Amino acid sequence: MSEIAEIIDSLENRIEKLFIKVTSLEKDSISLKAQLDNAATVIYKQSEEINYLKSAGETLKMANSLLGGEENKRDTKLKINSLIREIDYCIAQLSD
């Protein structure tokens, strides 16, 4: 009988250790999920900032080329020609 009692005590101890381990893992999981959410938020904000800065960079390039910068004159001329074509198309559509 004492062997059965020892086996039962051993099983109880193992089960208790398993419950403690499960609880610890659940806490770790919650913590990791919170960290993941924070990281996703940071990534989203940084992505938005990158897009804004890219747009600002393009605007600055255009402004520099309009101010007489030699680097982007060709791009500026192409953009102006494209805008003129669009305006001409709109005028033609309004005339019809």
Image: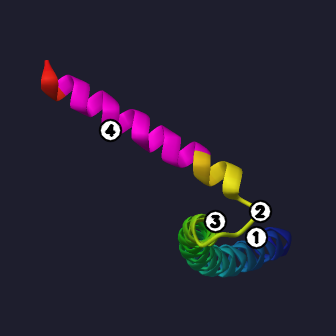
Which residue is painted at 61% across and 74% down in the image? 46
Check disc 3 and report its element: helix, strand or loop. Answer: helix
Using the numbered discs, state the Cα–Cα distance from disc 2 to disc 1 in whole angstroms: 78 Å
Observer-side mark, 1 or 3, equals 3
Pick the front one: 19 or 54: 54
Observer-side mark, 1 or 4, equals 4
Mark number, residue 11: 1
Check disc 1 and report its element: helix, strand or loop. Answer: helix
Instruction: Name the residue that disc number 3 marks.
Output: 65
Q: Quadrant of residue 85?
A: top left
Instruction: Name the residue that disc number 4 marks.
Output: 87
Q: Residues within 10 Å of mark 2 (few under 14, many from 20)?
A: few
Q: Quadrant of residue 57?
A: bottom right
Using the numbered discs, state the Cα–Cα distance from disc 1 to disc 3 in whole angstroms: 79 Å
- The earlier-in-sequence mark between 1 and 4 is 1
- The image position of residue 43, as x and y in percent, is 62, 71
**Is 79 displayed left or right of 89 in the figure?**
right
Using the numbered discs, state the Cα–Cα distance from disc 3 to disc 4 in whole angstroms: 21 Å
The amino acid at mark 2 is: Glu
Pick the front one: 50 or 66: 66
The amino acid at mark 1 is: Leu
Q: Quadrant of residue 91?
A: top left
- The image position of residue 6, as x and y in percent, is 82, 76
Q: Residues within 10 Å of mark 4 (few under 14, many from 20)?
A: few
Using the numbered discs, state the Cα–Cα distance from disc 1 to disc 4 in whole angstroms: 83 Å
Q: Decide: is 36 above or below 82.
A: below
Instruction: Name the residue that disc number 2 marks.
Output: 71
Q: Residues within 10 Å of mark 3 (few under 14, many from 20)?
A: some
Using the numbered discs, state the Cα–Cα distance from disc 2 to disc 3 in whole angstroms: 7 Å
- The earlier-in-sequence mark between 4 and 2 is 2
Using the numbered discs, state the Cα–Cα distance from disc 4 to disc 2 in whole angstroms: 26 Å
